[in-house]
Image (tube, grey):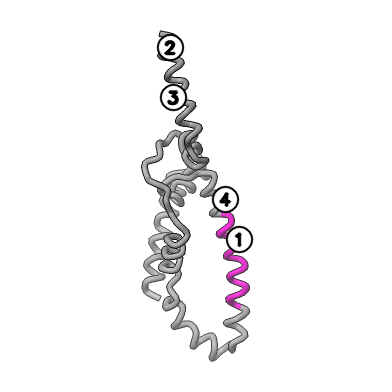
Amino acid sequence: MGSSEEHIRLVTSMQVSEMDSGEKRLNELGYKQELRREMTLLKTLAITFSCMSVFSGTPLYGQSLRYAGPACLVWGWVIVSFFTWFVGIAIAEICSSFPTTGSLYFWAAHLAGPKWGPFASWCCAWLETIGVITGIGA
């Protein structure tokens, strides 16, 4: 009986040593990794550029040039990019702490606590839906 317990302990320790840090964190959260993590730099850039549509902001260029001039476009882009960088850093930090599928909804529920978690996830889902609809409409 003792040898089977040693075998289980040995197999478990071998499996844990073969895991990457994301898979270990998922195990700590009580999840088993089911999706493969094989995003190359090219795949990541392709997804990023497909989400950053240049044409979504094109209708706004005429108004900005007419009322504020080209300096508004240049400095506006620089300032907004600077502050958006901080949002990206914060989301990356949360993502590295809770590497689960469902990302924003799970993070909102987990960070809001058991009392407000479902409401936070619901608000997050609706704000995301409204953002997608208005982004498509722009």
Residue under the point 61% across and 66% down: 83
Q: Which quadrant would the C terminus be assigned to in this image?
A: bottom left
Which residue lies under the disc numbered 3?
11
**Secondary structure mostly taken by the magenta-highlighted segment of the chain:** helix
Which of the two labelled residues, at mark 1 and mark 2, occupies the earlier sequence position?
2
Q: CA distance from mark 2 to mark 3?
A: 12 Å
Which of the two labelled residues, at mark 3 and mark 1, occupies the earlier sequence position?
3
Which of the two labelled residues, at mark 2 and mark 3, occupies the earlier sequence position?
2
Residue under the point 46% across and 78% down: 57
Which residue lies under the disc numbered 4?
93
Which residue lies under the disc numbered 1?
86
Q: Which quadrant would the N terminus be assigned to in this image?
A: top left
Q: CA distance from mark 3 to mark 1?
A: 42 Å
Circles 1 and 2: CB atoms closer than 8 Å = no
20 shown above or below 82: above
Which residue lies under the disc numbered 2?
3
Which stretch appears magenta?
Answer: 76-90
